[in-house]
Amino acid sequence: MSEKSDLVVHRANDVGGRAPGGPLTRDEHEMTPSEKACHALLNVLDVHKLVNTEEKRRAVEDLGGQIIGSLTYYERCAVAASQVLMEKGLITSEELGRTMDDVRRRWAVEP
Amino acid sequence: MTARFGVGERVRIATRDAPGHVRTPVYVRGHVGVVERVLPVFLDPEQEAYGVNSGVGIRLYRVRIPQATLWPDYRGNADDVLELEVYEHWLEPAEEDPR
């Protein structure tokens, strides 16, 4: 496969045989409250047929290797789910941004 | 839905390098394996991933490939195999001996 083809076809989560290999780092942790909330929300989106597992996995892949490598599992899922909801016209970036601002104000977290 | 392949049948995993979300990793494409078991029919993840809701079902198989044929520098046990699950539209009949 040419370098360009590989960039297009060999998607970020398809890591089998890719250098560098080596041992897996296993640092399991208790799920945080926000991770539990995200998990629950993803289940609700799936049950209501708004974002299914396949769409979520595809949207995570679409984020690309750099973002996937930098975000935690639930951070990736949350961004991916928001992408799918926007693709389907169910939310807009503006609505999402306003809600995120509301939440930040509520929790008094620096943006 | 009738299964196209049976247990023990030799199959070649297609070399189909196209854009899109698929469930067949690049490193097994083009390799020959043996059907280890025939699994149920599932919704086609390649269509489901794009919100198509086509409802198309595709047969899934568990395919066994010798590790030594996948990795030229494999140093593990000669009998080691990889088992992975592959959808029917990625499989073709193969005559060659996978070993």
Image (cartoon, grey):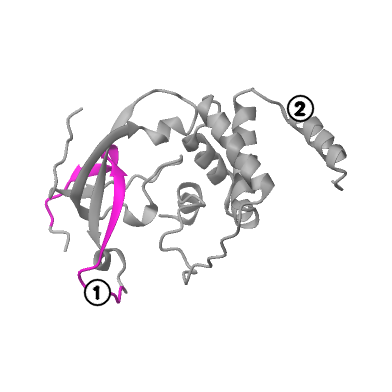
Residue B95 is inside the magenta segment: yes
User: What kind of residue is marked 1?
Assistant: Asn
- At label 2, counting other C-alpha atoms closer than 10 Å, the crowd grade (few under 14, some 14-19, many 20 or more) is few
Residue located 13% across and 42% down the image = B6
Do marks 1 and 2 share a subunit?
no
Residue located 24% across and 51% down the image = B63
- Residue corresponding to mark 2: A95
Residue A97 is inside the magenta segment: no
Q: In this picture, which residue range is highlighted in magenta?
A: B74-96
Residue B42: x percent and y percent? 33, 33
Q: Secondary structure at mark 2?
A: helix
- Residue corresponding to mark 1: B77
Q: Quadrant of the N terminus of chain A?
A: bottom left
Residue located 64% across and 23% down the image = A90
Residue B40: x percent and y percent? 26, 36
Q: Based on the displayed image, in which of its 4 quarters is residue B96 positioned?
A: bottom left
- At label 1, counting other C-alpha atoms closer than 10 Å, the crowd grade (few under 14, some 14-19, many 20 or more) is few
Give the chain of mark 2.
A
Q: Secondary structure at mark 1?
A: loop
Which residue ends up furthest to the bottom in the rendered image?
B75
Observer-nearest residue: A22 or A99? A99
Residue B7: x percent and y percent? 14, 46
User: What kind of residue is marked 2?
Assistant: Glu
Observer-nearest residue: A102 or A12? A102
Residue B17: x percent and y percent? 38, 46
